Image (tube, rainbow, N blue to C red):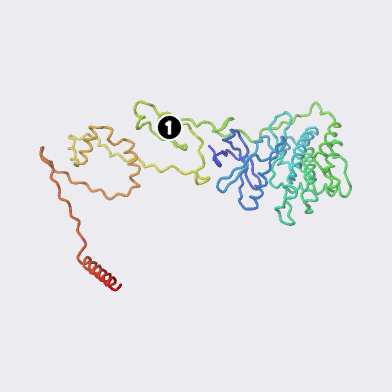
């Protein structure tokens, strides 16, 4: 079983890693479903402030993967999202290379639809790239895109968290105005969308710097090889170096894309369909489609104890010994210990006491039993009359476990008690007198007390 975070999210296995945190597949015990959990690895004030901004974003849109909930446990924090298993656009390009134009238009339409919802909330994403655009595992069906990772996004008008002359984002997907230090705005996201579109139709990362220089020097170039002219006009409208000449809104770019799709040629009959595979992989042992599986029983020799421990042995005590069989305890998910991420180890068990070796040949005569102490004899006789008062096996086992941790003096054997004739009373021993302090200590103490008494009497007479 995995570690349970904040008593709710059970971390199963890591599925990704970002700049400030790792993404885990987790089981939500409250909602009974699998989620993606982003665990923050750093705890400095700057990173925590970005985390607060990111987890506070709530956008409910089918093509946006925004945080759904968050939790904190000691010095760790996480937020959860829907679990998307089809990988990113980078995985699709790695499997197929350049994608068919109509398939690219479907992906761009969904991306611009999600970006429209993000911009409607006044949020600039600032980190649109293939690795942050995820896909559901739809197989050969219609693809389903999700825009994710709002770690460096910000609302227009909010204070910037970066220092002067610093640019936040992924190199190769910056808009020209970002490199000049302009305030983040919606057209900067559209420039990144144009670069992503070029990446999908060409199958490789475009050289954004060379594109900007070519646009600034020669204007809009002709359509590259393999890109239909209607689709290229839409992509070029998002790649204009001047933000005033670029599409101003994602809605405008999406309308232009819809018109361009109607002018695209029909796909060929031999065109290979694009299949979006499951990139996460199967669940580890102990987890099924409906969550953590029940841990199997240990058999008749043991039963599941608290916190996953197993109590060995088939013995019963108390009321269970009256012919009733022990029932297996249902295993519950073990919560995190009070120490945070570290679980407390079970208490050390005392090894069994060694038994003396038996002689190979039986003795000729059994030795006479040693005489018992009078108090021990009374205890044994009382236990024979009332078996419920005798020591139980569980009590002896507990005493054996705690004996090494109990401070005891050296055991001295007691002398055997002399036999008492039948009918006679046992002699009563005289009480042992405890010696007092020596005279060398007693006399000075008495003299000091007498002097204090005299001083007190004199003080009373003077008043």
Residue 270 located left or right of residue 346: right
Please tell me which residue lies in front, 401 or 93. 401
Would you say 389 lies left or right of 195 here?
Answer: left
Question: Few, some or many C-alpha atoms within 10 Å of disc 1 (few <14, some 14-19, many ≥20)?
Answer: many
The image quarter in which residue 304 lies: top left
Foreground residue among 458 and 179: 458
Task: Give residue 34's position: percent from left, percent from top.
Answer: 61, 34
Q: Is residue 20 above or below residue 364?
A: below
Which quadrant holds residue 31?
Answer: top right
Badge 1 element: strand
Residue 441 in picture, x, y percent from top left: 23, 66
Residue highlighted by disc 1: 303
Where residue 58 sits, quadrant-wise, is top right
Q: Residue most toward the bottom? A: 462
Quadrant containing the C terminus in the rendered view: bottom left
The residue located at (71%, 34%) in the rendering is 62
Residue 118: horizontal and vertical position, in percent? 74, 41
**441 left or right of 194 in image:** left
When the figure is inspected, residue 189 is found, relative to residue 280, above or below; the finding is below
Q: Between residues 354 and 38, which one lies in front from this camera angle?
A: 38
Q: Residue at x 20, y 60 (%)?
A: 436
The percent coordinates of residue 230 (x first, y second) are 86, 36
For the image shown, how many numbered marks are present on the structure?
A: 1
């Amino acid at each position: 079983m995995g570690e349970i975070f904040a008593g709710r999210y059970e971390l199963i296995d890591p599925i990704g890693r970002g700049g400030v945190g790792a993404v885990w597949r987790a089981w939500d015990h409250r909602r009974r479903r699998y989620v993606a959990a982003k665990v923050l690895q750093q705890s400095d004030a700057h990173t925590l402030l970005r985390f607060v901004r990111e987890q506070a974003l709530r956008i409910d849109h089918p093509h946006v993967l925004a945080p759904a909930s968050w939790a904190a446990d000691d010095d760790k924090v996480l937020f959860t999202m829907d679990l998307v298993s089809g990988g990113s656009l980078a995985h699709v390009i790695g499997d197929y290379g350049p994608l068919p134009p109509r398939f690219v238009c479907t992906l761009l339409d969904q991306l611009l639809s999600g970006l429209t919802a993000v911009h409607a909330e006044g949020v600039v994403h600032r980190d649109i790239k293939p690795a942050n655009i995820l896909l559901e595992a739809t197989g050969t069906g219609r693809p389903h895109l999700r825009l994710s990772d709002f770690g460096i996004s910000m609302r227009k008008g909010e204070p910037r968290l970066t220092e002067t002359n610093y640019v936040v984002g992924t190199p190769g997907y910056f808009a020209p105005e970002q490199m000049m230090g302009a305030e983040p705005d919606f057209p900067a996201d559209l420039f990144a969308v144009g670069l992503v579109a070029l990446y999908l139709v060409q199958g490789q990362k475009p050289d954004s710097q060379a594109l900007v220089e070519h646009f600034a020097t020669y204007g809009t170039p002709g359509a590259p090889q393999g890109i239909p002219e209607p689709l290229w006009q839409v992509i070029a409208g998002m790649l204009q170096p001047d933000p005033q000449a670029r599409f101003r809104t994602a809605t405008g770019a999406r309308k232009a894309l819809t018109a361009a799709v109607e002018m695209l040629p029909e796909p060929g009959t031999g065109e290979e369909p694009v299949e979006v595979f499951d990139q996460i992989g199967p669940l580890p042992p102990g987890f099924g489609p409906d969550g953590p599986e029940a841990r199997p029983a240990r058999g008749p020799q043991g039963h599941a104890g608290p916190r996953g421990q197993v109590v060995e042995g088939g013995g019963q005590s108390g009321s269970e010994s009256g012919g009733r069989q022990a029932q297996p305890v249902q295993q519950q998910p073990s919560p995190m210990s009070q120490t945070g991420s570290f679980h407390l180890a079970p208490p050390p068990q005392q090894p069994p006491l060694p038994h003396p070796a038996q002689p190979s040949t039986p003795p000729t005569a059994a030795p006479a039993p040693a005489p018992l102490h009078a108090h021990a004899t009374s205890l044994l006789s009382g236990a024979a009359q009332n078996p419920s008062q005798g020591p139980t096996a569980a009590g002896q086992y507990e005493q054996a476990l705690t004996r090494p941790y109990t401070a005891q003096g050296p055991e001295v054997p007691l002398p055997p008690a002399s036999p008492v004739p039948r009918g006679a009373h046992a002699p009563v021993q005289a009480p042992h007198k405890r010696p007092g302090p020596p005279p060398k200590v007693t006399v000075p103490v008495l003299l000091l007390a007498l002097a204090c008494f005299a001083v007190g009497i004199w003080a009373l007479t003077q008043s």
